[in-house]
Image (spheres, helix red, strand yellow):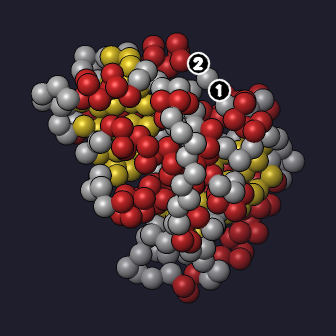
């Protein structure tokens, strides 16, 4: 693999023959097996993939969250060396490479930027759109790979591509979980031992909620989720919503569900200063 830090060096490398299609895997580092699964899937589709490692400041509405976000480039590169091929590229730019000038663009994603994560992290998805669109401009990928754990982010990026007309294919990848069911996340390593031990309650609860939908209505299910998550006092529920997979409109009653749509139960939990998110497909039958 080649480790490059500048836009110029990256674009020069991508001009070489036999570099198409190009796959992009955007990350903020602090890599785990979930990230590696993205890269393996990308490598199966593309003769060359670009893995970006960049902690994007414009998507953090909490300065403490930005400051505390785990960073260990040496460890990340060691993990990447186990899955990337000779021609694959790791792109590790600094702020000036990504934003040579202040990015003042404001995006309009309609309802996608008005619910769930957007309510609790104002400006987050505008920052995501800024950095993703910039990476698309730099790399010009044919395909880009994202984990479905960040369910709302995938919907936003798809809308970004639709608005831009770039034709980039967004490839969502399944959630990768720890042995105890906790969705893999770079933030898991920030949990204290007690909360980490209890964190599998998140997946257990949304799994139970998905089964409840067959006999219970959404208000009852939301009450159940809140009680289960907050039972021990170690976690606070920020939201649990059942939404469609296109517009992400939260449902109030299960009678609103349509046979032609797919629905997901999406959750965000606060463990002290750490936020954890997860989701699960839900079915009426």
Residue placed at 53% from the left, 30% from the top? 96
Residue highlighted by disc 2: 72
Which residue sits furthest left?
17
Residue placed at 75% from the left, 39% from the top? 63
User: Contact (CB < 8 A) between labels 1 and 2?
Assistant: yes
Q: From the viewer's perspective, is residue 221 above or below residue 230?
A: below
Q: From the viewer's perspective, is residue 36 above or below residue 276?
A: above
Quarter location, residue 215: bottom right
For this rendering, which residue is in front, 54 or 180?
54
Q: Is residue 237 left or right of residue 213?
A: right
Question: What percent of the width, then of the height, locates residue 234?
Answer: 83, 44
Q: Count the marks: how many?
A: 2
Q: How crowded is mark 2: few (under 14 residues within 10 Å), some or many (20 or more)?
A: few
Residue placed at 38% from the left, 19% from the top? 4
For this rendering, which residue is in front, 11 or 170?
11
Question: What percent of the width, then of the height, locates residue 133?
Answer: 43, 48
Question: What percent of the width, then of the height, locates residue 13?
Answer: 25, 23
- The CA span between labels 1 and 2 is 7 Å
In the rendered image, the quadrant that contains the N terminus is: top left
For this rendering, which residue is in front, 87 or 100?
100
Residue placed at 19% from the left, 39% from the top? 21
Residue highlighted by disc 1: 70
Residue 180 seen in this snapshot: no
């Amino acid at each position: 693999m080649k480790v490059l830090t500048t836009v110029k060096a990256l674009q020069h490398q991508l001009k070489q023959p036999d570099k198409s299609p190009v796959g992009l895997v955007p990350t903020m580092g602090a890599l785990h097996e979930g990230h590696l699964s993205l890269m393996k899937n990308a490598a199966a589709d593309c003769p060359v993939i670009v893995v970006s490692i960049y902690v994007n400041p414009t998507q953090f509405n909490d300065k403490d969250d930005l400051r505390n976000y785990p960073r260990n480039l040496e460890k990340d590169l060691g993990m990447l060396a186990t899955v990337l091929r000779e021609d694959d590229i790791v792109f590790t730019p600094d702020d000036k490479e990504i934003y040579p000038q202040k990015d003042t663009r404001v995006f309009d994603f309609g309802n996608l930027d008005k619910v769930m994560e957007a309510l609790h992290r104002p400006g987050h998805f505008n920052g995501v759109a800024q950095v993703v669109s910039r990476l698309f401009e730099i790399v010009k990928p044919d395909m880009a790979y994202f984990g479905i754990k960040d369910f709302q982010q995938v919907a936003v990026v798809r809308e970004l591509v639709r608005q831009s007309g770039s034709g980039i294919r967004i490839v969502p990848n399944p959630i990768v979980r720890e042995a105890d069911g906790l969705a893999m996340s770079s933030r898991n390593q920030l949990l204290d031992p007690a909360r980490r031990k209890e964190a599998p309650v998140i997946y257990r609860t949304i799994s139970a909620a998905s089964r409840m939908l067959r006999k219970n209505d959404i208000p009852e299910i939301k009450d159940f989720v809140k009680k289960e998550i907050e039972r021990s006092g170690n976690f606070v529920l920020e939201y649990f919503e059942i939404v469609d997979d296109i517009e992400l409109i939260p449902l109030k009653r299960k009678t609103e569900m349509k046979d032609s749509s797919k629905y997901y139960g999406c959750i965000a939990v606060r463990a002290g200063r750490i936020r954890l998110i997860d989701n699960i497909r839900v079915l009426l039958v």
